[in-house]
């Protein structure tokens, strides 16, 4: 029996109380293929990047990011986890590189933004990524609704190291920031206090601003989220390796 058929069969069994719920969660975790394969399967089957990239949540994120890019004269943006491109459709970035682990997601983006020379898309391979390539380094690096989906420790750490290594001036992370996970969490979600990891491992960067979202999560992911914005800047104010001549340091506003 295929995994999808097995899941459908289990869903058809009448609810037997907390014990049945625990068995269902356990089975989902046992069948979870890993974060990379999960997202490729999800996009390949026709699903989207999720509620956070649509509707009022996407509009809130776009307002914050577009304002930041304009105020700080950002000329180039790299995003780790571009997904299906719906969030990007609301963005106003002079130049953009979108990375994702899913070939299907990249194809969706390439089709959606065909003919737009300001945007390019590349496959992200966590174990073989070269973040210091001059062609990738950008003024601003983004990670939006990604960190809490990185359930594997090595993938989580690689993501943050690569994210910050690719940024000349700023990094913005949109995520939850807690080590508290519900006992019955979805297998593709793992909350982490990522700010503590950054403090311990990336001393050249400082958290300069936290922007709470106006739609807190209340048991409904379509109307609220547990993610907030976290804005980082190089601690010494330098632009970092690969910066072009004439660049100016600007404080977060």
Image (cartoon, rainbow, N blue to C red):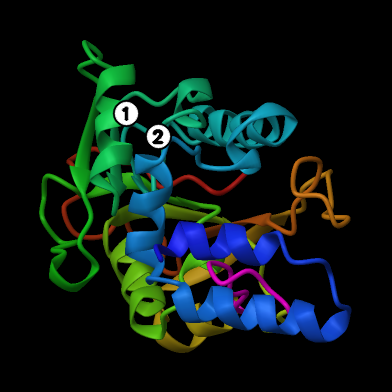
Q: Position of residue 10 (x, y in %)?
A: 64, 67
Taking the spot 41% from the left edge, 35% from the top edge, the residue there is: 84
Instruction: List the single residue furthest toward the top.
Output: 115
Categorize mark 1 by other alpha carbons within 10 Å: few (<14), some (14-19), many (20+): many
Q: Position of residue 72 (x, y in %)?
A: 49, 36
Residue 181's tag is none
Residue 183 in view here: no
The answer to the question of whether label 1 and label 2 lie on touching residues, with beta carbons closer than 8 A, is no
Q: Nearer the viewer, residue 20 or 132?
A: 20
Which of marks 2 and 1 precedes in the sequence? 2
Taking the spot 77% from the left edge, 48% from the top edge, the residue there is: 213
Is residue 99 in the magenta section? no
| Element type at mark 2 | loop
Distance Cα–Cα, label 1 vs label 2: 22 Å
Is residue 184 in the magenta section? yes
Left or right: where does residue 244 sit relative to residue 218?
Answer: left
Which stretch is magenta? 183-194
Q: Position of residue 54 (x, y in %)?
A: 63, 31
- Figure label count: 2
Find residue 152 and report its image quarter: bottom left
Residue 74's tag is 2
- Does residue 68 sit above or below 212 in this rendering? above
- Does residue 39 sit above or below 85 in this rendering? below
Question: On the rendered image, what quadrant is the C terminus found in?
Answer: top right
Categorize mark 2 by other alpha carbons within 10 Å: few (<14), some (14-19), many (20+): some
Q: Nearer the viewer, mark 1 or mark 2?
A: 1
Q: Which residue is mark 1?
A: 109
Taking the spot 40% from the left edge, 41% from the top edge, the residue there is: 45
């Amino acid at each position: 029996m295929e995994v999808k058929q097995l899941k459908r069969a289990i869903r058809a069994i009448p609810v037997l109380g907390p014990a049945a719920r625990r068995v269902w969660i356990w089975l989902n975790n046992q069948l979870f293929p890993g974060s990379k394969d999960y997202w490729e399967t999800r996009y390949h089957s026709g699903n989207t990047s999720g509620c956070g990239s649509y509707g009022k949540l996407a509009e809130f994120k776009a307002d914050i990011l577009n304002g930041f890019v304009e105020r700080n004269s950002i000329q180039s943006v790299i995003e780790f986890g571009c997904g299906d491109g719906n969030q990007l459709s609301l963005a106003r970035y002079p130049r953009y590189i979108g990375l994702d682990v899913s070939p299907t997601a990249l194809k969706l983006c390439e089709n959606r933004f065909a003919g737009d020379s300001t945007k390019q898309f590349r496959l992200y391979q966590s174990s073989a990524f070269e973040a210091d390539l001059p062609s990738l380094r950008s003024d601003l690096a983004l990670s939006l609704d990604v960190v809490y989906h990185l359930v594997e420790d090595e993938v989580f750490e690689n993501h943050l190291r690569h994210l910050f290594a690719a940024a000349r001036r700023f990094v913005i992370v949109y995520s939850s920031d807690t080590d508290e996970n519900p006992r019955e969490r979805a297998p593709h979600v793992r909350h982490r206090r990522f700010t503590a990891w950054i403090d311990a491992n990336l001393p050249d960067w400082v958290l300069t601003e936290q922007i709470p979202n106006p739609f807190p999560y209340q048991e409904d992911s379509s109307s609220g989220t547990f993610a907030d914005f976290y804005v980082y800047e190089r601690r010494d104010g330098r632009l970092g390796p690969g910066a072009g001549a004439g660049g100016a340091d600007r404080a977060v506003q």
